[in-house]
Amino acid sequence: MNNQKKNGRFDDLIDAARSRQQRDQPQVIENKATAYGKSTDPNYTRTTIYLPKQVHRKLKAIAATQDRQMSDILTQLVEQWLLSLNQGEE
């Protein structure tokens, strides 16, 4: 014997609510990123560094005024430092 008692009005209300929910729910459109950032670029590795708060504030302010990313400035500085080490070995 079927234990589920079907109440026509109640089921009709549930069906109507589900239909309205599906109708009113915005269609999900999958956004595929067209621009790749450093977080998805396999040539980059995420790292963490600790800076004194005052140094971080100054770096952040200068990066903003130059419309650059802090990571780009730090990369440039580390590359210069590495070059200076290599030149000292010659």
Image (spheres, rainbow, N blue to C red):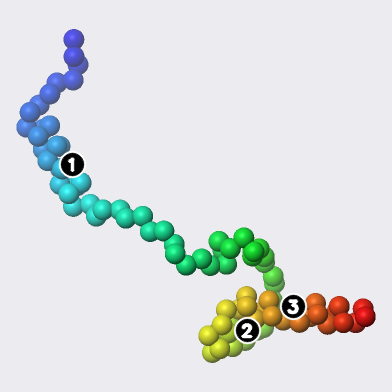
Viewer-nearest of discs 3 and 1: 3
Secondary element at image label 2: helix
Q: Quadrant of residue 11?
A: top left
Viewer-proximal residue among 46 and 89:
89
Q: Quadrant of residue 83?
A: bottom right
Residue 61 visible to the viewer: no
Circle 1 crowding by C-alpha within 10 Å: few under 14, some 14–19, many from 20: few
Quadrant location of the C terminus in the rendered image: bottom right
- The alpha-carbon separation of the residues under discs 2 and 1 comes to 53 Å
Q: How many marks?
A: 3
Q: Which residue is mark 2?
A: 59
Secondary element at image label 3: helix
**Residues at discs 2 and 1 in contact (Cβ within 8 Å):** no
Q: Which residue is mark 3?
A: 79
Q: Is residue 62 left or right of residue 34?
A: right
- Percent coordinates x, y for residue 6 in the rendering: 12, 23
- The alpha-carbon separation of the residues under discs 2 and 3 comes to 17 Å
